Amino acid sequence: MNDRELIAGLNLCRPGADDLQHPELADVAKQVASDPRAQAIHVRIDRIDTTVRAAMHEVTLPTGFETRLLSRIRDAMADQTDASSSTAAKSNVTSQPQAPTVVSRRRWLAWSTGAAATAATVAAVIFALRDTPLDEDQLHASSQWHDALIAKSKWLELGRDNLGDHTFPSELRWTPRRYCDATSVVGRDAYAYDLTTPGGPAATLFVIQQEDNAHLSASAPLEPHLRTQGYSIAYWQRDDAIYVVVVESDRVEDYRMLLRTSVPLAA
Amino acid sequence: MADPAQPLDRPSPNVEALVAEHGAVLFRYAYRLSGSSADAEDLTQQVFLTAIQKLDQLREPAAARAWLCAVLRRAYLRRRRKPQPSSNFEIDVELVADNIPDDLNFDGERLQRAIDELPDDFKLVLVGFYFEDCSYKELAERLQLPIGTVMSRLSRAKSFLRAQLVEPEQSEAADAQKSMIDPQNNVHEPKAPHRTSRSRGVAR
């Protein structure tokens, strides 16, 4: 066993643990047991790991962290409840609990500067935020909208009698089978359409009303903008609407299965 | 999920308890992943907001920390604007054991800079190893990756971290030590790990 192999194996051991007992490390364990030099290397790596592990936890909490965190959670929950009840009152479609949105610490600090920041002020700011255009950061969180709807939403069937009321982007290969009002989940005027195909992964198209230019491409991309942790997300903007496709798969093929091949796609 | 019966001016007791018990740990974990205090706070908030919605998925309260850490990892990855080109990042294991110092002397800032240099694939494994004290087998399960992939990433990430944290004088001392062992200095290969050539990929 050369040094590289020895170090590669020893790197897998946690400090102070008996990870050398794992069958994958049998050769390394044998070497350490029989070779004083290997044993010394093991001790050195173990010592360094102990130092690094301790340092990893040494992060100073910002002043007022826990209070601020609880306060932000409280506001997000209140916001969520308000949005749900307001949407339910406006529409006969059963509204779903809104996925709470993260209020950036930077924005939060700006809002809450000074003790005079009353609850009414905070509520007004949150309301104003809802009218701001969606940006890419928010679109990257769209898998949460998908999760919220897939798990709990009451979907309405799309059929001959109501299909004409909906328009879909030309890039899509399949006509959705059902839809629901996603306003409470997205936080602005939006509908969600179930794009799941038989045997395929769950997929949702969000159609979000937005006139402001979000600087997105005007057609569906050839590859999703984001592929991570089991989701693919793609978005584009056309005709005063932002289209967001969320697929419960990080395979490009699963996303492309939803698209027509005859329609030009964004690079 | 908010209980309509709960007053709106305070989170449910469960959430308060979760924040009290895990808030600081999650913030530190988020900081090590994101490298930014503001982002870490946002991420921590996001984790608890997600946790509120999915609290019914937590079957074993004893597993709350691991569950929250998993939510944090997903939230972190979702916030990344684009997947990182990790295949362009070359990391290898040290070729010469004598280059490994007896111990390291570094501050938290330097540690963070070194972590920030790692692509997410490696960073998640490394931080999980040190922060959650996970074995490589547990990491493979939690990250849903093949065990060989985790072994390779962990080993290379640790070697990279050591190389970043070693003091220049320690490095020189190690070189001197090596020269004493090998006066010709022509047997051992150059010190690794290294991060070079963007045109060369990493076998995963």
Image: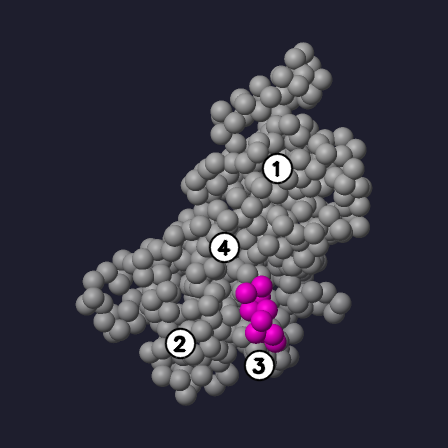
Asked whether disc 4 touches disc 3, contact meaning CB atoms under 8 Å apart, the reply is no
In the foreground, B92 or A137: B92
Q: Amino acid at mark 2?
A: Pro
Q: Is residue A264 visible?
A: no
Residue A151 position, x and y percent, is: 59, 75
Visible residue check, residue B114: yes
Residue B64 counted in the magenta span? yes
The residue wearing badge 1 is: A44
Return the chain for callout 3: A
Name the front one of labels 4 and 1: 1
Give the amino acid at mark 4.
Answer: Tyr
For the residues labelled 1 and 2, the Cα–Cα distance comes to: 47 Å
Magenta range is: B58-67
Whether marks 4 and 3 lie on the same chain: no
Of badges 1 and 2, the one in the foreground is: 1
- As drawn, B189 above or below A221: above
